[in-house]
Each structure stands twice: as structure tokens, then as C-alpha cells.
Image (cartoon, rainbow, N blue to C red):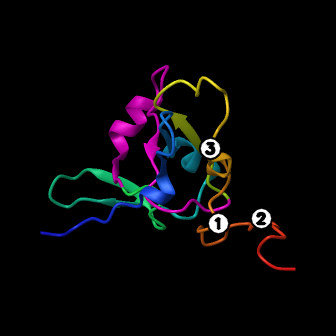
Amino acid sequence: MAHKVRRAEVAECRQCSTYCDRVIRPSTCVAAGCPALYHYDDELTGRRYMGCLHKVFSVEIDVELFEQAERTRLGFGAVKLAGPPLRRCQFAVEQAFPARPDGQCVNIRFFDLPDAAPDAVRAFDLRDRL
């Protein structure tokens, strides 16, 4: 049986009681015409599936169900990131609980593009070196 490694450092922050997850809406990938979005037809079922070549999200989505959901008021919704987003990825951060009572985030950089992303724009930080 294959073992899937969790990439918690990319997709989630659990440093305080406000649990945050990075998510992406596959509809933004479709609308942007992302070149990393692929699709294939399953020969056994005749269904078409789509996914991300870079595994920014790891699920493969049934295209027909996706299109049905997109025609509703709520749309398909978001999926949790599985890998570092690329610069063109329109990810968001969802909080599982309301903000901290003191209003201070202990991991402010979590809302930025991760430094681990293949084409990340690294922040200029003098603490690294002069």
C-alpha cells in the first residue's frame, strides 16, 4: 500500500488556537487557463478527471461534477494545498476558528507565498546575510 507523506508545513499552521489552512479553488485554475491543469479520460468509467501537474492540489476532480457544482450559487469550493503553490496560483487562507482574542497572528508570513515554492519570490531579509 502506498504511503502518502503529509506536507503540513506547506498547507497548514497550528501555532495557535486559530487553525489556518492554505486552500485553492480549482475554478481559478480553470479560469486562468493554467498550463499545469491536466485532464484525462478514465477508460473504465468513461469519466473525465482533472488535476494539477505540480500537485499544488493532489486530488483529481471529476470534470462533470465540477461543472455541475460551478453552475450553482456556491460553486465547487476550495481544496487544501498539497504542495507549494506557484506564483500564478491564487491560493487563500481559511481559518478554522475565529481570530485570536488579542488579534495578533503568531505566523504572519503564513499568508505569503511560501519560500519553498519552486518559483517563489523570496523575501529580502537582512538577517539572512549582508
Sequence-earlier tag: 1 or 3:
3
Q: Which mark is residue 14?
A: none
Q: Residue furthest left?
A: 1
Eye-nearest disc, 2 or 3: 3
The N terminus lies in quadrant:
bottom left
The amino acid beneath tag 2 is: Ala
Nearest the viewer among 33 and 94 is: 94
Q: Which residues are magenta?
A: 59-87
Residue at which label 2 appears = 123
Q: Which structural element holds mark 1?
A: loop
The residue tagged 1 is 115
Q: Residues within 10 Å of mark 1 (few under 14, many from 20)?
A: some
Name the amino acid, label 3. Val
Residue at the outermost bottom position: 130
Which residue is depicted at the point 39% across and 39% down?
Answer: 66
Instruction: Of the two numbered discs 1 and 2 on the same chain, state the one appearing first in sequence.
Output: 1
Q: Which residue is mark 3?
A: 106
**Residue 35 image offset from top left, x and y in percent:** 57, 64
Q: Earlier in the sequence, mark 2 or mark 3?
A: 3
Reply above or below: 127 against 77.
below
Q: Residues within 10 Å of mark 2 (few under 14, many from 20)?
A: few
